[in-house]
Image (cartoon, coloured by chain):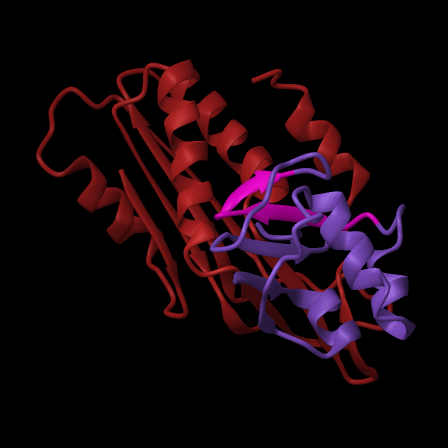
Chain colours: A red, B purple
Amino acid sequence: MYISVQTEDFDVAEVSRQLCGKRADIGAIVTFSGLVRDRSEAQNLLALELEHYPGMTEKALEAIARSAYDQWEIDDLAIIHRVGRLERCANIVLVVVISAHRKQAFEACEFLMDYLKTQAPFWKKEITRDGESWVDAKASDQQASERWNI
Amino acid sequence: MARLLYFASLREKINSEQELLELPQNVIRVDQLKDLLAQRGGRWSEAFSSGSGLLVSVNQQMANDQSSIQNADEIAFFPPVTGG
């Protein structure tokens, strides 16, 4: 299990390679990456500022990862979340799950992202040409998280 | 002393990142602490009034209004999370 909260960028292929190593029992790698997206109609987003709660963030991500291990037959996983100022189109988050079979890895990856979005203490602020504003939590994210009943 | 932390929009609203506070003897639950902070008036009372939707953690574990607190705890208040 690899968990990191960092300002540096990550390389999806490199993380996947390191997670698998030379293991021959891995049949599936599922990766999800989240990017800085311009949600504004005026297309005026300059960057996101990602704040977090050092110490608790890592613990929350570990707890989410342990739930995934408990629920699905997965062999290893990585969660990397960036913080600080992230420009348009930059990577924000990466989840990689490896498993013998794809179904377990797909589901675990989806669960990890749904839970991360509602349980881990990160906050996004949008920086646009017109000023700054905090992003509101979405009810749809809460519903996505609750559907797992875990 | 309890260590209080404030994050994101809450931190900006009350213009405070953290503080050390001696919890009075009658403050043993999160909701009692919120009432105490709301009594500071102005933006504090807005931020900590009931129905403000704030989340709370005690010693870096998610908690709620009924959770027990004591001096030496690390208690953090923050808005709903928006990572990912």
Q: Residue at x 33, y 14 (%)?
A: A73
Answer yes or no: is residue B80 visible: no
Name the image quarter holding residue B30.
top right
From the viewer's perspective, is residue B27 above or below residue A7? Answer: above
Q: Nearer the viewer, residue B63 or A122?
A: B63
Q: Is residue A36 left or right of residue B52?
A: left
- Give the prevailing secondary structure in the magenta stretch: strand
From the viewer's perspective, is residue B46 above or below residue B52? Answer: below
Q: Residue at x 61, y 18 (%)?
A: A148
Residue B73: image location, x then y, percent: 50, 52
Residue A102: image location, x then y, percent: 38, 19
Answer yes or no: is residue B22 visible: yes
Q: Is residue A88 left or right of residue A105?
A: right
Name the image quarter holding residue A70.
top left
- The magenta-colored residue range is B53-63
The quarter of the rendered structure image containing the N terminus of chain A is top left
Does residue B58 show up magenta in the picture? yes
Name the image quarter holding residue B19.
bottom right
Residue A67: image location, x then y, percent: 43, 24
From the viewer's perspective, is residue B34 above or below residue B12? Answer: above
Q: Residue at x 80, y 38 (%)?
A: A139
Does residue B61 show up magenta in the picture? yes
From the viewer's perspective, is residue A127 above or below residue B62? Answer: below
Outermost residue on the front side: it is B25
